[in-house]
Amino acid sequence: NSGKPTPAMRHVYRGTFMHSTQQAPLQILEDALLGVDKDGKIAFIGKGGELNKLSQDFGFSPSEVTQLTKDEFFMPGMVDTHIHAPQYSYAGTALDLPLLQWLDTYTFPVESRFRDLEFAKKVYTQVVKRTLRNGTTTACYFATIHTDASLLLGKIANDFGQRALVGKVCMDMNNSVQHYKETTQDSQDETRRFITELLKKKYPLVKPVVTPRFVLSCTGPLLGELGAIARDNNLHIQSHISENAQEVKIAKEMFPESETYTDIYHKFNLLTDKTVMAHGCYLSDDELNLFKETGASLSHCPNSNISLCSGVLNVRNVLKHKVKLGLGTDVAGGYSASMLDAVRRARDTSKFITIQTPEHETLTFEEVFRLATLGGSQALSLDEQTGNFEVGKDFDALRVNVAAPEGPIDISQEEGPKIQLERFLNLGDDRNIVEVYVAGRKVIPFTEPTAE
Ligand code: GUN
Ligand code: FE
């Protein structure tokens, strides 16, 4: 047509696409055509009937188009806004204690083993592969206090093609496992080294995140330094907040000059529009307003909240306060590394609230779908790059087959796409996720590393 250069397409797909937008928790595009360019970005989305025009405009041949079957659809990759990579080594066990005893008894002894890079490599490879296979295209990871092992996690995410935020954990207080902590100076120096070394690798999809474990593991001077490091380098920040009642009480005793838990982080400049805080079960409306004002977001980790008997987050109330919110698995406080589990527990938690308070407006499956995809990308301030199928964003996507041969769903009749999505979210598993794409690159099924 107009003589403008026609970018070559890496892939073109035709079929059903389902995603969320700011306006609609579920938008269904039936018989759509979507093109992914050589940079892995979505070049166009159009209607199947416009094939001839689109193929001319975007320089591809209709024979290159991959046609989905009636049992298949594409949805955006899921975003795990909070997961502890080292804790994958004991996921599915050790769920008999409340948070603070659980940390002392199980977590700190296990995390202290990640000084051993061989052990770290084994566990980190497993967690990256498992989460990718389950459809987590973006993960926001806590590692451990060990800088080299944390850098290794970044390398492994990059090697497998997962989009990741990776945090070297900071803690200069620990009264139970004495050797699993750092001096205040080491913690800040090693955080700087971690950031510098990770950025030097220029992994396209992996970013460092400043990671004070939580108030109970950090002195004021360390929190202050970490706030400054994040500000000076414009970095993401992640931590935990208001997860468990005993934790909230101790945090306030530690910092009596702060009125609330949220105010403690705020005073140390740790609440920014690139901050994601896990849990938040006991936040007051005033604290939620401070999240809204600062642009900080919450990671809702329902499996963990239930498994450690920590508390109940009222997501409806968080959304009413217009605080950004995504879902997290919080492995291993949450026993499942699958975001499909987080989707189900989020909906169950919302239903429990409705049982107790019938006027509560239960989250719909479409809303929870949005939290697992676009909501997560917003919570991590990555929504310019990912989260849904908008032209210009990276193609982070799951090709789902609801009727996968060995899969858990028996489809006996033709169903519309909305029912297919609902069934997949409630009953599906990795057998239904036949392909996973991150930035246009097919990362599942795993292929041997290529020269790409
Ligand atoms: N608070 C501080 N550390 C942790 C952790 O590792 N897991 C959970 N769930 N909460 C925490
Ligand atoms: Fe956590």
Image: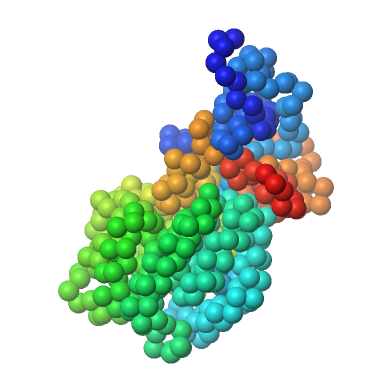
Q: Is residue 274 left or right of residue 126?
A: left
User: How does the figure colour the protein chain or chains?
Assistant: rainbow
57 is higher (above) or lower (below) than 442? above
261 is higher (above) or lower (below) than 390? below
Nearer to the camera, 69 or 418: 69
Q: Is residue 183 left or right of residue 336?
A: left
Q: Residue at 74%, 26% (x, y): give it.
A: 64
- Measured as percent of width and height from the top left, residue 12 is found at 67, 29
Residue 74: name its quadrant: top right
Task: Spot the residue most to the top.
Answer: 1
Quadrant holding the C terminus: top right
- Measured as percent of width and height from the top left, residue 230 is found at 33, 60
Nearer to the camera, 434 or 318: 434
229 is higher (above) or lower (below) than 452? below
Q: Residue at 43%, 37% (x, y): give it.
A: 22
Instruction: Tell me if residue 340 can be seen.
Output: no
Instruction: Tell me if residue 22 can be seen.
Output: yes
Nearer to the camera, 292 or 416: 292
Task: Spot the residue most to the right.
Answer: 405
Q: How many marks?
A: 0
- Measured as percent of width and height from the top left, residue 53 is found at 63, 14
Q: Residue at 30%, 74% (x, y): give it.
A: 222
Residue 403: name its quadrant: top right
Quadrant holding the N terminus: top right
4 is higher (above) or lower (below) than 262? above
Q: Residue at 38%, 60% (x, y): give it.
A: 237
